[in-house]
Amino acid sequence: MGGGERNAGNDIVLETSGLRKSFGALRAVDDVSMSVRDSMITLIIGPNGSGKTTLINTIAGVYKPDSGKVKFRGIDITGWPPYKINELGLVRTFQIPQPFTKLTVIENLLISSRDIDRVSISKNLLRKWIEKESSLVKEAFNILKFLNLDKVWDHYAYELSGGQLKLLELGRALINKAKLIIMDEPIAGVAPTLAHSILGFMRKAITEYNVTFLIIEHRLDIALKYVDFVYAMHRGRIISSGVPDEVIKDPKVIESYLGEEIKK
């Protein structure tokens, strides 16, 4: 499963040390130290309420940690606001895609580009601006073609299927020059065939666009075939880490999350 051995020597892109985040008496993230290596898909697993989403939100600046450090590409980004972290190339997408529903697919990509002149663009001037910025339009179309969304380039975002919306989120991250993309359940609610396609596109994007992925996913029967390294969480702590085969066979993971299913 995955490609952990193939990518074992890659540099660390993201690192947390002693990260903690509490909400009242609940310590949602409890002394988490982890690292994400370049050109890999790193997966976080665990039962609901184990702290996975709080962890990635704290990394991405949605929450400020109570203590601990977050480093991205060697830079201490602890407590930085999301927009500043995004500018460095760390992009966080969401379980429920959040496109601009009244814009077309191609417009969603263009408006997400860090190369866009946000002062000159508006709804009324968008078409004129697109005609002028041919190089950016070409880049956007190349990404849509890569993600097999080029046939729906002129559809409004609200017309897309759930799986296509997930791919659009990925496309928006790619045109934003992301170096690390954090995704919360990228194949949730998606039919198995398209789920495999989404994860397949992610693997190809590592090579084509020089990106790294940190994801949360519950559909292990599909996801484990594509990931390189796994962290398992329970009650805010990391209880196991390693290549997929090792983690899913760890007795602590079986007891806290996988239960009897993994024994069958």
Image (tube, rainbow, N blue to C red):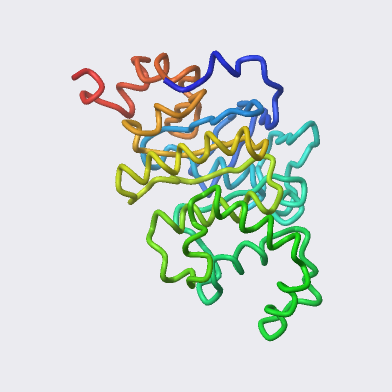
Identify the image quadrant of residue 96.
bottom left
Up/down of 156 relative to 46, above or below: below
Up/down of 144 relative to 249, above or below: below
Work out whether residue 150 or residue 168 is closer to the camera in this orientation and state it: 150
Q: How many marks?
A: 0
Residue at image coords 26%, 22%: 262
The quarter of the rendered structure image containing the N terminus is top left
Work out whether residue 83 or residue 61 is closer to the camera in this orientation and state it: 83
The quarter of the rendered structure image containing the C terminus is top left
Up/down of 138 relative to 2, above or below: below
Residue at image coords 46%, 22%: 2
Asked if residue 79 lies left or right of residue 37, the reply is: right
Identify the image quadrant of residue 160.
bottom left
Asked if residue 213 lies left or right of residue 51, the reply is: right
Residue 52 locus on image (x, y percent): 48, 39
In this view, the residue farthest toward the left is: 264
Residue at image coords 79%, 37%: 76
Residue 253 locus on image (x, y percent): 36, 22
Up/down of 140 relative to 209, above or below: below
Residue at image coords 74%, 34%: 71
Asked if residue 7 lies left or right of residue 164, the reply is: right
Residue 182 locus on image (x, y percent): 57, 43
In this view, the residue farthest toward the bottom is: 124
Work out whether residue 180 or residue 149 is closer to the camera in this orientation and state it: 149
